[in-house]
Amino acid sequence: MTRENVPMAQFWKRLIDSASAHRRPDPPVMAAVAAVIGVDEPHLLAWGEGHHGDTPVTVVAVDEGLALVDPQGGAEAVAWHEVVRGGWREEGSTLWWSFLDQQSDEVRLEEPGDLPEVFNDRVTASIVVREPVPAEGGTVVIAGRRRLGRLDTGQILWTVIADGDADLTSPDIERRVLDRTAALQKEWR
């Protein structure tokens, strides 16, 4: 390769890299995403490759949730409104999330691309209202959430999470949380 060809070679490499950044997951992966999410032709927001435990997976974010598809086409999904905590851990290149029942999961990403930002955006978009209620030992957070994308029914799903040492079984806290949730439900129909 001559010196004159180097800039042109770099140009073509950048052009090919740019085009591949905009490509979509393979059709079988998108078919698995459609099946596990429950919508025909899901709208792709971001995707990447990674590992779920020791299993290689394609990680696909669509309007309705996050899907993990293994090489055999097996898939599992997390709806955005089900995630109560989560985010990106730069160290370890890990996207993590936890649920109301305190179960958690994570996926290690080889090249995260836009997945961390999309994850944060979609989880946040699922929250209609979030209100902390001070409680002895911590805070109780009441949240109204909705499904996103084509699974959105307009119905708000209500959750209550204790932060710190707040005791949800305390009669005083229980009464305050139930009263405030009832008021929020009237306000956010």
Image (tube, rainbow, N blue to C red):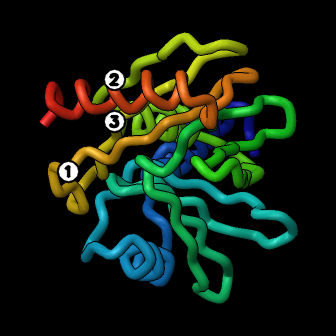
Query: What SS does tag 2 mark?
Result: helix
Residue lying at 55% horizontally and 39% vertically, measured from the top left: 84
Q: Are marks 1 and 2 in contact (CB under 8 Å)?
A: no
Q: Nearer the viewer, residue 164 or 137?
A: 137
Three-letter amino acid code of the residue under disc 1: Gln
Q: Residues within 10 Å of mark 2 (few under 14, many from 20)?
A: some
Residue receiving disc 1: 155
Residue 115 occupies which quadrant of the picture?
A: top right
- Which quadrant, please, contains the C terminus? top left
Does residue 7 show up?
no
The residue nearer to you, when weighing 138 against 87, is 138
Q: Earlier in the sequence, mark 3 or mark 1?
A: 3
Q: Which residue is mark 3?
A: 144
Mark 3 and mark 2 lie on one chain; the one further toward the N terminus is 3
Kind of residue at disc 2: Arg
Spatial separation of the CA atoms under disc 1 and disc 2: 18 Å
The circle drawn on residue 180 is 2
Q: Secondary structure at mark 3?
A: strand
Residue 159 placement (x, y as % from top left):
44, 41
Which label's residue is closer to the chain start, 1 or 2?
A: 1
